[in-house]
Amino acid sequence: MIIQICIGSSCHLKGSYELVEKFKNAIEAHDLEAEVTLAGSFCTGKCNREGVTVQIDDEIYTGITPEDFKDFFKEKVLAKI
Amino acid sequence: MRKFDTKVQHLKYQVLREVAKEAWDDTLLENFLDIPKIIVPGDEPTMRCCVNKERAILSERVKMAMGGTRENPNNIEVLPMACDKCPASGYEVVADSCRNCLAHSCEDSCKFGAVYFDHDHRAHIDKDKCKNCGQCAQNCSFSAIVKRERPCMKACKVKAISAEGGKSASIDNSKCIQCGACVYKCPFGAITDKSYILNVIDMLKKSNDGKSRVYAVVAPAIYSQFKHAKLGQVVSGLKALGFHTVVEAALGGDMVALKESRELAEKGFLTTSCCPAFVAYIKSQVPDMLPYVSHNFSPMVEMAKFIKETDKDARVVFIGPCTAKKGEAKLEKSKPHIDEVLTFEELQALFDSREIELEKLDEDCLDNASYYGRIFARSGGVSEAAAQALKEQGIDFEAKPLVCNGIEECMKALLVASKKLKAGQMPEYNFIEGMACLGGCINGAGCLTHSEVKNKMEVDKYGKEAMEKSIKDAVNAVMV
């Protein structure tokens, strides 16, 4: 599974740095280093008013915030592995 | 609001805009011969002796807008027809102004016996004896002695331009550092930089199929430019042109600051490598200093490389104030990373070729870098960033920078450093910051407007607006 987090200006200003840290920690905590590749990307062209854009394989999710990270990770990452 | 400093820039812009318009419409090959007539439509000359000459020179400008002479590797080229062959005879007495006075302070101040008088007691200068020291001109009470020199030659501190026998200017490619000082200073627009605007339009068009994405990497000097609009509107404009997204070259600056400061601490003596004109000067004139030039990429290439690591289908266009970057992009080590270079002048032409009115667009955002990455754009910035990077990385090494503002200061510093290092002595500084343009990139030849002081203030202000306060934070934010 490849998780790409947008690190472009718009997402950066909305906290992509914090979200990257949360992903890194969660992947480590669940021992998923072998299954999941975390990567950055400059803009997926889906800038949103709120939150960060995250692409998991071919699926693009917008508006992810540090607050809803836990649910997002459970639903879109853990459930699919 | 006025977009350019000079009418020469405006003329160049008009040509670029028309060429770009035709290129977008795929009609350039049919219509490029008509462009001079579009710019000078009437029968009355507006700039030169006759419309025919104006149009003939405009054809040459069209050629430059389409990439110039392919056989010539230099990105700076003379348009001989446009050159006015200005006088370059050195110090001369202006006949009407010389009052035939008694004091003859011109004669007394000349150490070389070059001043003589005719039967009317009017002063003359013997060219064979004159050493161009200027003492006579300084001492004449009537300011009757002037220095006749060509503005291009005066601007070219590396002495790459010659005008032998009163001919059109010619550039010695082995000495030219492509800084563009002559391009900006020639009042006839007879020296100009080749444009690769067509390659950029082609890249943008091709990216429409979604198989590639064109990234704009913008130099931090942009903050002092396009002042008729807000920076966020410039970002929107770039996206309206078809760029996938816009990234700050200043983030590459942050990355370089971390690496370069470590290199400085390891080697003990270093010069910067971000200004391509400074590096070109070392290569051609002070090659024994080459081992001391930082091996790091410039922020432009560092950023482009990083983008291509995150997106294998990326094409990267650098947009900045610099003509020398056009040369740097063509070096073997930069080629795989950077696809094309545009100046701010060329970007303005691109916007207008698509009738994009920046001031009417919504504001997008641009925030990738720290204050330190952003101030690379002005003299003294790289030194400040290097010192900060040493501190942030906890490296116990004191950077003692020598900030060289403009190529003349660089030339002097390199000469002294080279002598000392050869003799096994350490200069009193250990870090030479070299910037070919006075004030730094903010005063580059490809700027829309030039102002050392105002542009510095603008860039410093922009630096302080950065979300990330430290270099490490800015870099870590993208290191996923």
Image (spheres, rainbow, N blue to C red):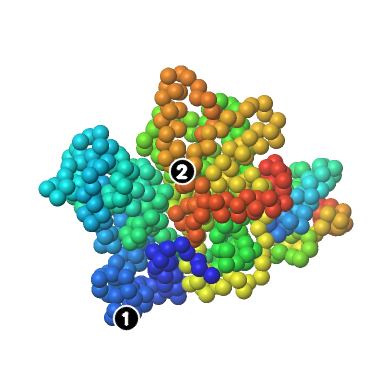
Quarter residue A15 falls in = bottom right
- The first of marks 1 and 2 along the sequence is 1
Task: Give the vertical position of B352 relative to B418 (above or below).
Answer: below
Circle 1: element type: loop
Type of the residue with mark 2: Gly
Question: Which residue is rendered at x = 60% and y = 30% of the image?
Answer: B399
Left or right: where B355 falls relative to B125: right
Quarter residue B257 falls in = top right
Question: Which residue is rendered at x = 63% and y = 35% of the image?
Answer: B387
Q: Closer to the camera, A27 or B430?
A: B430
The residue that mark 2 highlights is B406
Image x and y of residue A66, in percent: 83, 54
The residue that mark 1 highlights is B42
Type of the residue with mark 1: Gly
Q: Chain of mark 1?
A: B
Image x and y of residue B136, in percent: 28, 42
Image x and y of residue A60, in percent: 73, 62
Dot 2 surroundings within 10 Å: few (below 14), some, or many (20 or more)?
some
Number of disc labels: 2
